Image: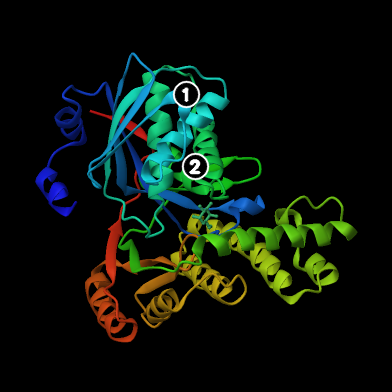
Amino acid sequence: MESAVKQYSGKLINEYFRDYFLTPPDLTVSSPGRINLIGEHTDYNNGFVLPAAIDKSIEISIKKRTDNLIELFSVDKNEAFSVSIDRLNVSGLLWPDYILGVVDELIKAGHKFTGFSAAVTGNIPIGAGLSSSAALECATVYALNELFGLGIDRMGMVKIAKLAENNFVGLQCGIMDMFASMMGKADNAIRLDCRSLDYEYFPLKICGYKIVLLDTQVKHSLASSEYNTRRNECFEGVRLIQQKYPSVQSLRDADEQMIEETITNPVIKKRCRFIVQENKRVTEGCKNLLAGDIYAFGKQMYASHTGLRDNYEVSCKELDFIADECSKEKDVVGARMMGGGFGGCVIAIIKEEAIEAIVKKISKEYKIKMGQELKVYITQLHKGTAAIN
Ligand code: GLA
């Protein structure tokens, strides 16, 4: 597998396509990974998030076929998979499922199209919490929409990509990851209201500072089961609050007083309290960014981490260690675990001239204390899903 990747390295995805399928593709699409500045686990609670697309992406080259066959090739895995469009089934290989899930949702929505050949590659690290799967789903839906002229707008494509993940892949995620990948804009974060789907671009004015991702390189196996547990705990909280406040439809509508009054179970209480506080932090954080006060924004990031660690309980010792080391550095504006939790990356805003020394120091400590190598990505905010060529 490794040797195949090396053999291919340096080539463009359309060249991989041509070499594998012996014909050039009709179209190539790139879709980015995402970060989230603040607003964790708020998306499926109808709250606010502040994600952005980054300069790491998944690329797909695609060509129409005249029959009903879907022929897929993953450059990075050096694996192929084929299936007929009218006999879609979970592949057993995982990576094809993100593509097949999109096809399945498009068919369910009444779209008609033939089979296709596609090759995929990417440089979004898998399992680092940067949403490589959402990027593949967005790349696929964008490519099929273009190729077959399906006439779906961007927000429609975001919804199809999310449903693919929920129904075919089976993860009950919220909308944030697909939204960020599809709607990203260079140098901007996006504040999204996950209930109304209204959004606003936020130019990130952090001159002299950079967004640095510190990848723990761990992914604890609890991640997906605990994700669904947290969702259910939040929904149970809403059910309890509704008994006294029937107008509350989601934790987005609740406040801390309602939680105190209606929920006695201490676990449900702290989960709900976290969500209410995290929503406030997104609103406050956006004000801080607009005012150009990134140190105030950084405080919201640290508070978010503390809440995720102590109340939502989705952190892990590796993430806590890195966030804690960051908090000791005056040139780190803010840091927190990012994404679903139980591994993946800490996102930090660090003064540019101090990055090298800080990263060196934390990497060394991380290796000694956690026995792992730290991976580091300095990111740029990038545009969303687009055709390339
Ligand atoms: C994962 C999910 C998102 C979101 C985050 C937590 O990335 O896919 O929908 O819930 O976790 O904020």
Q: In which quarter of the image is the C terminus?
A: top left
* Ligand 1 closer than 8 Å to label 2 CB: no
Q: Which amino acid does label 2 sit on?
A: Phe
Q: Where does the image place residue 315, in percent across and percent down from the top left?
A: 50, 72
Looking at the rendering, which quadrant does residue 61 occupy? top left
Name the foreground residue: 169 vs 296. 169
Q: How far apart are marks 2 and 1 (CA)?
A: 28 Å
Q: Where does the image place residue 254, in percent across and percent down from the top left?
A: 76, 59
**Element type at mark 1:** helix
Name the foreground residue: 358 vs 194. 194
What residue lies at 28% left-to-right and 61% top-to-bottom? 377
Residue 103, relative to residue 34: is it above or below? above
Please say if the residues under marks 2 and 1 sit with CB atoms less than 8 Å apart.
Answer: no
Residue 138, relative to residue 129: is it above or below? above
Name the residue carrying label 2: 179
Does residue 2 appear left or right of residue 327 in this picture?
left
Residue 289, relative to residue 263: is it above or below? above
Residue 241: which disc? Answer: none
Name the residue carrying label 1: 86
Q: Where does the image place residue 112, in percent across and percent down from the top left?
A: 49, 17
Q: What residue type is labelled 1?
A: Asp
What residue lies at 45% left-to-right and 39% top-to-bottom? 183
Does residue 176 appear left or right of residue 11 in this picture?
right
